[in-house]
Amino acid sequence: MLSNRPPRCLPVHSEPVPADDRSSAGVHRRRTTDRRRVLRGVFAAALGLVSAPILVASRSAGAEEARFDETYRGRSIVGVRSGGRRFGNGGSGAWHVTVDGRQLHLMRRVDGGWMSMVDHYQSYATPLAAARAAVDELGLVARPGAPGDRSGRREDGRMPSGAREAEREHRHGVHP
Amino acid sequence: MVYIRKDVSTLTTSERRRFVNALLEVKRRGEYDEFVRTHIEYYTADGERGLRVAHMAPSFLPWHRRFLLDLENTLRRVDESVTLPYWDWTRNRTLTAVPWTVDLLGGTGRRSDRQVMSGPFAYRHGRWTIKVGVTDTEYLMRDLGRSRDPLALPTARDLEKALKDPVYDTAPWGSTSAKGFRNKLEGWGRGSGPASWLTHNRVHRWVGGHMVSGASVNDPAFWMHHAFVDLLWSRWQRRHPNARYLPARPLPAGDAQHGRVVARRQKMPPWDVTPEELQDHSRIYRYA
Ligand SMILES: [Cu+2]
């Protein structure tokens, strides 16, 4: 059911900035620019111009399944790799992961590891391992999302008006 | 006037009260949540594209130094007597030690939902509602010592391994730098599991709950932890007086990290400040 839908987890990346000694060209990214960049990423993704993280190494490349769907500690965790395109050096793909239907943002480490916003001080070999670890960290009650958003919002639902800016914020650097 | 940052275990009753009250006031004004947002926004991992400044990067230390100064200035506008205390986790190592007392940060979270129930930051007092975060919970969460699979705080011996490294940072200037003070202190170890959680990172895990998430700033423990990390940078500088922030110059085109880390005299977003300008804090504050 999820497979035909394009992922809402939009890869958003800043472009590499040229660095020259004193001027710090581009290093001057201000927050407003960041927001613009986020929006740019959204548009780019909508047009199918999805960028990917740069990976120097990707040990899990190729070995992973293109999706997973399991119940772990009573939580439904689902991951879908957006297919076909070559991502990064390793081609390990952009993943869209949810816990109980709520998006779990993942980031890449340069060694190919995956980290989630819920568990941000270590990384895991696969998106599935990162999702399980996030469930471990979430405990029995918490779910991914914005504080106070107790609705049963699912991926296919709209964001309730109560959803805070954080939702937008943590889309930053988020990744596949 | 140069002010003093103290070991949190030495604060008097009134110093504790004033520190806590200043935090609650900054939170009430909505300013605190801006800090949470900034930290989420600038946490870019080293497998992602683009410039990264706050973590997995040489500027981890100066970035957080400036971040702490901003919060401290905000607190001092509320109460000029307040300075950021530091938590020396090599000495205050138990679940009942400072800063986990009811007059400071309160204790661990309860078992069912990790909600912090004691102290001024307990949700029921209505003065510390989480507004910016990555989970739907509005209460502060902790799991001190990682109760489900206990973990010890880093020791002075662990720190020594970082402090004795005479080089500030090394290629590839990120989470896989095997040498250099910066990553040994930041704590991205090799492999996976508890053995790979070192120093600064390990402390985030030990506190657990919000502290282990991208929204770690929601726990005021963040500031005391990072004040100690900041102190350790100063301690390292005293021990290696000729060592400086690296890279000294921007990495050349062709280097995989070109344009992705900040060199000594480059500006460090979101501020107009360079790592070099932040190397010496002795005219602003000192550690007691
Ligand atoms: Cu930290």
Image (tube, grey):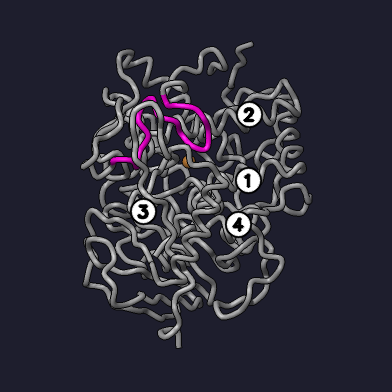
Residue identifier under label 2: B72
Say which amino acid is labelled 3.
Glu
A167 and A130: which one is in front? A167
Mark 3, secondary structure of its residue: loop
Instruction: Write down the residue under mark 1.
Output: B107
CA gap, disc 2 and disc 1: 23 Å
| Amino acid type, label 4 | Ala
Ranked by sequence position, the earlier of labels 3 and 1 is 3
Looking at the picture, tell me which residue is in the foreground, A139 or B94. Answer: A139
Q: Residue A125: x percent and y percent?
A: 30, 62
Q: Secondary structure at mark 2?
A: helix
Write the start and end of the magenta stretch as one range.
B258-275
Q: Nearer the viewer, residue B144 or B209?
A: B209
For image coordinates 55% across by 28% down, the residue present is B86
- Would you place residue B140 above or below residue B286 in this image? below
Q: Nearer the viewer, mark 2 or mark 4?
A: 4
Q: Is residue A86 visible?
A: yes
Q: Secondary structure at mark 1?
A: loop
Please report the residue visible at 38 percent of the width from the left and 15 percent of the height from the top: B238
Mark 3 lies on residue: B48
Specify whether B36 is left or right of B199.
Answer: right
